[in-house]
Image (spheres, coloured by chain):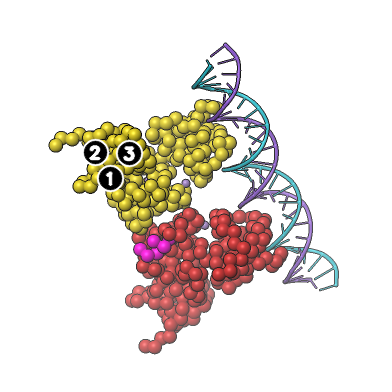
Chain colours: A red, B yellow, C cyan, D purple
Amino acid sequence: MVDSMAKNAPLSRSREDYLAHIYRIQAVGHNVNTGEVAQHLGVTPASTSAMFKRLAQEGLVNYKSYSGVSLTEEGERAASHVVRRHRVIERFLTDILGIGWERVDEFANRMEHAMPDEVLEAIERLLGGPDTCPHGYPIPSEEGKLAVATGQPVEALVAGEWAVIRHVDESDTELLRHLRERGLVPGTLLQVAETNLIDGTRTLRIGDSTLVVGQRIARALFVDRVVDDA
Amino acid sequence: MVDSMAKNAPLSRSREDYLAHIYRIQAVGHNVNTGEVAQHLGVTPASTSAMFKRLAQEGLVNYKSYSGVSLTEEGERAASHVVRRHRVIERFLTDILGIGWERVDEFANRMEHAMPDEVLEAIERLLGGPDTCPHGYPIPSEEGKLAVATGQPVEALVAGEWAVIRHVDESDTELLRHLRERGLVPGTLLQVAETNLIDGTRTLRIGDSTLVVGQRIARALFVDRVVDDA
DNA sequence: TAGATGAGTTAGTCAAGTCTAACTCTGAGC
DNA sequence: GCTCAGAGTTAGACTTGACTAACTCATCTA
Ligand SMILES: [Mn+2]
Ligand SMILES: [Mn+2]
Ligand SMILES: [Mn+2]
Ligand SMILES: [Mn+2]
């Protein structure tokens, strides 16, 4: 309830993008350095440094020169709102409008900054309160609570293990189309039948069919192990 | 087909707003002066002058100092796209999301700049190709063709005349709520039963009921006369 | 433990878009 | 035809957020 001197000016588009990317990097446990943020956002490290300083001044991140940033409580609140908008919009685009999941991340990146709260809430009601985006990432609640994204890359599994796909890397359009065409979507149960350590390929069993995938895919699919109690 | 040196950089949000407002003013036959645009956009006349110069340089408007602007062919194409997005979004907000018509203009003003073409087309398909916004204004076609908005204010009618509401002024939230509650929406048939020239009120007959309205409403309702062939 | 390497920061510049204050043009009324 | 009020324009400043080029710091290696 303490409002901590909140000037209620809405955040600029730029700030929202920086915060959301910091949030996503933080969510996978990495510590957030200038270069990684710059790369994700397609700006120079110099610009990122400048923005880190502004965000720190405004109390949205903790920033120590040469050692990266972390979100403050206020920054995390703001960031989770943006990520929430992003993921709900993605769901809307795929589920209601029928747009392919390989394109919705890009579209949501634009739309996430221009969506009034009331509109977002109406969309969420229409969708029936989804809890993940189409790529499997959890949607933060209104209050900023986020279900922890479990999962590790298929690369980490050994032959014989069963697993369920939880989420997939959403940054590569080509790869996403590829995955969907092969049924490699969140929720799918699979078994690693064979791992070929020479060339990095894996043979996956999905239902009745088998599929050989290379390293690129083995790193983009995040799964939870399932105990084989057959 | 002639591309006339089109650098395909997308227009800035600001340019889109200026162009769209110029378009709307031009559509009702007014000539477009600095002050009116400035007022609509909530900026100073100085800023508007500066933008007129930029738009002229880019070939989007014809501009002669001290005598206003008009859209070039290219400017009209760009402007009609923005207005089209605005009005389709309004329809989406009212018809699919159930948001009240008094708020959708404001929301659409933000969203109109962040809506990819593919998303807009999908929304339009979902709506079944609407041809007006919720307030009755025509939606320009993809190619920029616009059905002419007919209609004159109720103020212009004399006692006894019948008319159909075509569109309503959409800028005033309070007024819009008021109108909807009284059934004064596009498509409604009414008769001016009486005009009181002393205080500017009119008595309207709608279906079985009558309604006394003042000047504010009489100027906000745009109607087409209907011949009374009873 | 002294470099060297590369990530990160600072300094300086730029473009877009806004503002205020001071000006200049236009046309309505005399 | 003057004149002058008000609409419109110019001048100059500011903010945001980006860039390049030159620097500085941290760390890893020899
Ligand atoms: Mn974005
Ligand atoms: Mn996603
Ligand atoms: Mn707008
Ligand atoms: Mn409308």
Q: Could you tell me what secondary structure mostly forms the magenta stretch?
A: helix
For mark 2, what is the residue?
B193
Q: Nearer the viewer, residue B59 or B20?
A: B20
Residue A75 against residue C30 in the figure, above or below: below
Q: In which chain is the residue bearing label 3?
A: B
Q: Is residue B220 left or right of residue C15?
A: left
Residue found 39% across the figure and 35% down from its top:
B27
Compute the Cα span from label 2 to label 1: 9 Å
The mark found on residue B211 in the picture is: 1
**Are discs 2 and 1 located on one and the same chain?**
yes
Compute the Cα span from label 3 to label 1: 10 Å
Which quadrant does the N terminus of chain A fall into?
Answer: bottom right
**Is residue A201 in view?**
no
Give how far across and how far down residue B10 sits, in percent. Answer: 50, 44
SS state under label 3: strand
Q: Nearer the viewer, residue A149 or A73?
A: A73
Residue found 67% across the figure and 65% down from its top:
A63
Q: Quadrant of residue B47?
A: top right
For mark 3, what is the residue?
B201
Q: Name the residue furthest front.
A: B198
Q: Earlier in the sequence, mark 3 or mark 2?
A: 2
Q: Which residues are magenta?
A: A120-126
Q: Earlier in the sequence, mark 3 or mark 1?
A: 3
Quick one: label 3, few (<14), some, or many (20+) residues within 10 Å?
some
**Are discs 3 and 2 located on one and the same chain?**
yes
Residue found 43% across the figure and 79% down from its top:
A163
Q: Is residue B170 left or right of residue D17?
A: left
Q: In which chain is the residue bearing label 1?
A: B
| Amino acid on which disc 1 is placed | Leu
